[in-house]
Image (cartoon, rainbow, N blue to C red):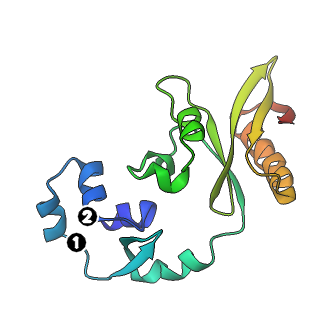
């Protein structure tokens, strides 16, 4: 449960039980002692005590998360994306896009296109933050290097 809370916190015993496919009573019986109750959008949630400060100051960074990144697999997806149309676009049954994460917030989606040993990213921005464009370009370079291909470019719409 500590790992779940570290990855998906703040959370509830019910959400942890749903993720683990375990009875809520079993989860509550093993609930960590070093959790702190917090209010998240009017809901009672719990977070590991040593991570409370992260709620107040999320990391200032841009990341390209893959379609099945563990961060996107939590049961409380409305906390990440509360717009039903955008949630449907991010979590379709087949052909999920990746997610652009800017300062801890979902700021858009991305899809890779490889042709002739060159990678091109198609990015759909939900936020017009200037820092996101530079961060996405940096992450695209890293992704191309990881895949062992050159970067052909980043198309942002």
The image quadrant of residue 31 is: bottom left
Mark 2 to mark 1: distance in Å?
A: 8 Å
Q: In which quarter of the image is the N terminus?
A: bottom left
Q: Is residue 124 left or right of residue 99?
A: right
| Mark 2 or mark 1, whichever is nearer to me | 2
Secondary-structure class at tag 2: helix
In the picture shown, does residue 57 fall above or below 132?
below
**Can you give x and y, in whole percent of width and height, for residue 142 in the image?**
75, 46
Q: In which quarter of the image is the C terminus?
A: top right
The image quadrant of residue 27 is: bottom left
Q: Residue at x 26, y 50 (%)?
A: 18
Q: In this view, does 99 lie to the left or right of 16?
A: right
**Can you give x and y, in whole percent of width and height, for residue 130 in the image?**
87, 57
What is the crowding at mark 1: few (fewer than 14 residues within 10 Å), some, or many (at least 20)?
Answer: some
Q: Which residue is drawn at 38% across and 49% down?
A: 75
What is the total number of numbered labels drawn onto the structure image? 2
Residue at the disc numbered 1: 31
């Amino acid at each position: 449960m500590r790992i779940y809370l570290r990855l998906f916190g703040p959370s509830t015993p019910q959400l942890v039980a749903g993720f683990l496919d375990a009875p809520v009573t079993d989860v509550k019986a093993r609930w960590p002692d070093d959790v702190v109750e917090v209010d998240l959008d009017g809901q009672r949630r719990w977070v590991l005590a040593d991570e409370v400060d992260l709620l107040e100051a999320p990391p200032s960074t841009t990341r390209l998360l893959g379609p099945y990144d563990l961060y996107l697999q939590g049961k409380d997806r409305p906390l990440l994306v509360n717009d039903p149309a955008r949630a449907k676009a991010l979590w379709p049954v087949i052909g999920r896009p990746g997610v652009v994460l800017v300062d801890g917030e979902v700021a858009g989606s991305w899809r890779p296109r490889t042709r002739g040993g060159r990678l091109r990213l198609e990015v759909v921005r939900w936020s017009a933050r200037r820092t996101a464009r530079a961060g996405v370009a940096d992450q695209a370079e890293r992704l191309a290097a990881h895949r062992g291909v050159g970067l052909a470019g980043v198309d942002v719409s």
